[in-house]
Image (tube, helix red, strand yellow):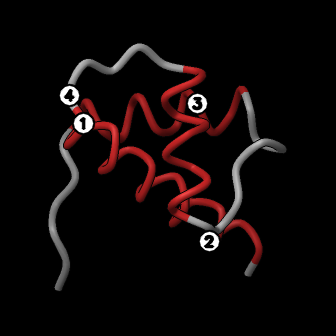
Amino acid sequence: MGRIKTTLTKRTGLRLFNTHKSEFTKNFEKNKGKVEKFADIPSKKIRNIVAGYIARLVKQEES
């Protein structure tokens, strides 16, 4: 069992993923920079959670 993602995380992650799908990869480190570039998220912790969620979405889409 993993950690439960909040509505804010899922909503932001899905919006970013759908708008910039080709920009994101399975690599969390690269996604952190992309999230910083595309969204104005003041908290580093929330930015990292969103980047991890997007990495997970990319992996699900590939399989």
Q: Are marks 4 and 3 in contact (CB under 8 Å)?
A: no
Q: Are marks 4 and 1 in contact (CB under 8 Å)?
A: yes
Rate crowding at label 3 as few (under 14), some (14 to 19) or many (20 or more) other CA atoms within 10 Å: many
Three-letter code, disc 4: Ser
Which is closer to the viewer, label 4 or label 2? Answer: 4
Q: Which residue is mark 1?
A: 44
Residue at the image position 71 percent from the left and 26 percent from the top:
19
Return the x and y of residue 51 as percentages of the image width and height: 45, 49
Three-letter code, disc 3: Leu
Gap in Å between the C-alphas at discs 4 and 1?
A: 4 Å
SS label for mark 3: helix
In the drawing, what numbered circle is on residue 60?
Answer: 2
Three-letter code, disc 1: Lys
Return the x and y of residue 45 as percentages of the image width and height: 20, 43
In the drawing, what numbered circle is on residue 16?
Answer: 3
Return the x and y of residue 44 as percentages of the image width and height: 24, 36
Residue at the image position 68 percent from the left and 34 percent from the top:
18
Q: Which residue is mark 4?
A: 43
